[in-house]
Amino acid sequence: MSLESAEWFSRNGIECSRVRARNSGFPKHLHDEYVISANLTGVEEIWLAGKTAYVKSGQVTLYNPGTIQASRFDTQAVEFISVHIPQTVIKMLADEDNLNSAHEAPVLREGIINNTRLFDALYRFATSARLEQGTDEEQELILLCGELFETPALLQKDDEQKINVVIEYLREHLSVKPQLEMLAQLAEMSKYHLVRFFTRHTGMPPLQYHMQLRLHHARDLLRRNVHPLDAAIMLGFYDQSHFINAFRKVMGTTPHHYASQVRSGHHKLPVP
């Protein structure tokens, strides 16, 4: 077998890969882990349960541990990302979701899956793991498994009140990056349920929500002529490149350029 390129990276025992291949394939094989892949480009031919099928761009494939599978790539290049999740991890999160009471890891729906939310969650997790973003990766794993289990995050009134307590805490602590474990204790929930309920309630996970709050406050400081370096330090961004990249991602420009434009008067913004 010949692959054009293959990149492997691992975070906290979960392996990920990004592969580009053509005129090659994987013979019949199996894995001890759950293997979930997102097809980015091209068409992959797979063999599963005695049948041949074709995975197109935007689709996901999922294989349970022990499932025999094979795949083949034609002359058109195929690029995909894969995440290998150990059975112990899936079992732990399934228990938190009350998915099963057995001692074994659950059997998930496998084969080709058309699910945009699952595709996006898989891509976000692999990207987070590749960039070594620490606690963000744990959050993305929880969201990915929530999509794998296909169980809705249904909030009760009491759950919404607990999430609002967490939101208030995040608003009052902008200079320190919160830990999921601490936020879960504050909400009296498991980390699994906190991330899923918070995302359902607000539209984004708690750590991203907190980052949004920090960046909006950074913009207010820059409007008030606070130097970008001082604003970064005030908000706990001791890594300047992290602050610049995060600000650019939301505002479309760097903190220094934003501040200079505001001071120049060319793009005056009202300050409350």
Image (tube, rainbow, N blue to C red):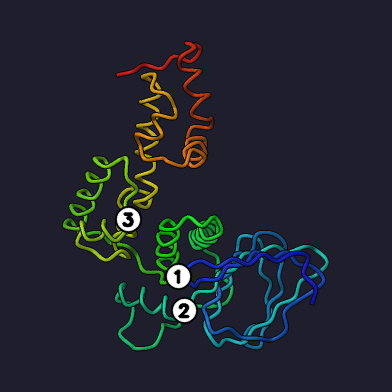
Q: Earlier in the sequence, mark 3 or mark 2?
A: 2
Amino acid carrying mark 1 in the image: Leu
Q: Is residue 271 above or below residue 186?
A: above
| Image mark for residue 148 | 1
Q: How many marks?
A: 3
Spot occupied by residue 119 in the image (x, y as percentages of width and height): 54, 61
* Circles 1 and 2: CB atoms closer than 8 Å: yes
Amino acid carrying mark 2 in the image: Leu
Spot occupied by residue 4 in the image (x, y as percentages of width and height): 78, 65
**Which residue is under mark 3?**
179
Q: Which quarter of the picture shows residue 87?
A: bottom left
Spot occupied by residue 20 in the image (x, y as percentages of width and height): 72, 64
Query: Label 1 vs label 2: CA separation?
Result: 7 Å
Q: Is residue 51 above or below residue 264?
A: below
Identify which residue is drawn at 38% across, 35% down: 233
**Which residue is under mark 2?**
108
Q: Earlier in the sequence, mark 1 or mark 2?
A: 2
Amino acid carrying mark 3 in the image: Gln
* Circles 3 and 1: CB atoms closer than 8 Å: no
Q: Nearer the viewer, residue 66 or 245?
A: 245
Numbered disc 3: secondary structure: loop
